[in-house]
Image (spheres, rainbow, N blue to C red):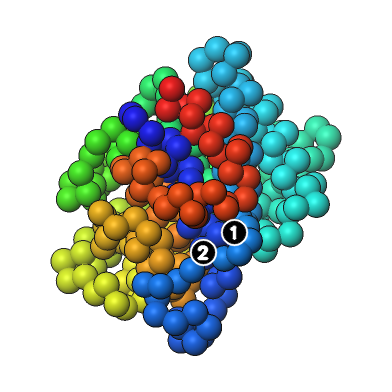
């Protein structure tokens, strides 16, 4: 695995910081402020947003769960819940956090509330998968554990099946890139994984969450999410057949406010520049959509593939929470 975990976590945070000032701005306004997109500077100071804050919360939860033995919902739910609530209560939670995450964490903090009752069931916002990279990076998990944990951590705040499926697919993408998958084969691998997962409901992780959805059964609930992901993979493949590196990537695969589009557009930016990781981050950050989340995910993909050496030292030395990011990355790389 080399330094994939360190590279992915650093790339994630750098993308987050790069896209933080450009979020909610149109491309013309971004260019008026910063010039050509290929020269977008890392801000000073290089502050992260809720994307990296929640990624670190999940990373700490995974580490807290390790001494309890094999990862299960029983071992992960208490620390993940505690970390998400701590994030919700933190005075540093002032970086434009998502409404869905705030609502769900408030419910998680209510005594006696079972976790399956907390998440809004109609939300498939990208807050579910912007933070899931640690599950793709943590060593020692079986494919079933990785899938279940990715969906479970999403379901703590987002109940829509597409949020769960996109989180699972995002963690899978990070993992296969860390394991050496080549960019040219990535979309086919993701499509195969999505098809194989389409009617799989991880009951051991999700319990009876599906019953709140109104679907006729757990398989129909799961399929609804995977069908959204397969649909956006079609859009991604179409965009890659005629790529336009100078155009707003959101025009090709979506603005990224919702989970499946965040995955697809971040992948698009990464795959446009698979050997130019900083350029991929800048392309994601100079976009009309959820720029910090798009660049955050693009950085996770690029870093998982290329390792810690992908990122300029003058950038990584300045990133907020550098020590915590490095500690997690080094522990998982070891």
In the image, 29 versus 129, the foreground residue is 29
Could you tell me which residue is drawn at 17 percent across and 50 percent down? 184
Could you tell me which residue is drawn at 58 percent across and 43 percent down? 322
In the image, 142 versus 244, the foreground residue is 244
Describe the element under mark 1 as helix, strand or loop. loop
Q: How many numbered marks does the figure carry?
A: 2
Q: Residues within 10 Å of mark 2 (few under 14, many from 20)?
A: many
Q: In this rendering, would 198 be left or right of 138?
A: left
Could you tell me which residue is drawn at 36 percent across and 43 percent down? 309
Q: Which residue is mark 2?
A: 42
Residue at the extreme right: 111
Q: Position of residue 74 (x, y in %)?
A: 61, 21
Seen in the picture, residue 232 relative to 117 is either above or below; the reply is below
> Disc 2 and disc 1: Cα gap in Å?
6 Å
Q: Which residue is mark 1?
A: 46
User: Could you tell me if the residues under marks 2 and 1 are in contact, i.e. CB atoms within 8 Å?
Assistant: yes
The reply to whether residue 122 is in sight is: no
Seen in the picture, residue 208 relative to 269 is either above or below; the reply is above
Identify the image quadrant of the C terminus.
top left
């Amino acid at each position: 695995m080399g330094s994939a975990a360190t590279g992915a976590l650093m790339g994630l945070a750098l993308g987050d910081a790069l896209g933080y000032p450009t979020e909610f701005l149109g491309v013309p306004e971004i260019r008026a402020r910063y010039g050509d997109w290929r020269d977008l500077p890392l801000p000073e100071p290089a502050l992260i947003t809720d994307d990296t804050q929640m990624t670190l919360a999940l990373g700490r939860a995974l580490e807290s769960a390790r001494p309890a033995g094999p990862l299960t919902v029983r071992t992960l739910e208490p620390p993940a819940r505690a970390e998400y609530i701590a994030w919700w209560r933190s005075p540093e939670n002032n970086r434009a956090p998502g409404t869905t995450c705030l609502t769900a964490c408030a419910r998680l903090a209510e005594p006696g509330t079972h976790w399956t009752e907390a998440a809004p069931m109609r939300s498939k916002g990208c807050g579910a998968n912007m933070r899931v990279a640690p599950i793709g990076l943590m060593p020692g998990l079986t494919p079933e554990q990785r899938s279940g944990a990715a969906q479970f951590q999403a379901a703590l705040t987002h109940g829509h099946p597409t949020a769960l499926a996109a989180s699972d697919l995002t963690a899978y993408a990070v993992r296969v890139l860390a394991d050496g998958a080549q960019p040219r084969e990535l979309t086919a691998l993701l499509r195969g994984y999505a098809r194989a997962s389409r009617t799989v409901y991880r009951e051991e992780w999700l319990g009876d969450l599906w019953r709140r959805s109104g679907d006729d059964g757990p398989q129909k609930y799961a399929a609804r999410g995977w069908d959204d992901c397969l649909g956006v993979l079609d859009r991604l493949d179409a965009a890659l057949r005629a790529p336009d590196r100078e155009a707003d990537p959101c025009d090709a695969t979506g603005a990224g406010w919702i989970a499946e589009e965040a995955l697809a557009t971040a992948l698009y930016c990464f795959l446009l520049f698979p050997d130019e990781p900083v350029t991929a981050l800048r392309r994601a950050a100079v976009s009309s959509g959820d720029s910090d989340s798009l660049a955050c995910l693009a950085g996770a993909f690029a870093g998982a593939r290329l390792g810690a050496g992908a990122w300029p030292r003058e950038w990584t030395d300045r990133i907020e929470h550098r020590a915590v990011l490095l500690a997690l990355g080094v522990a998982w790389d070891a």
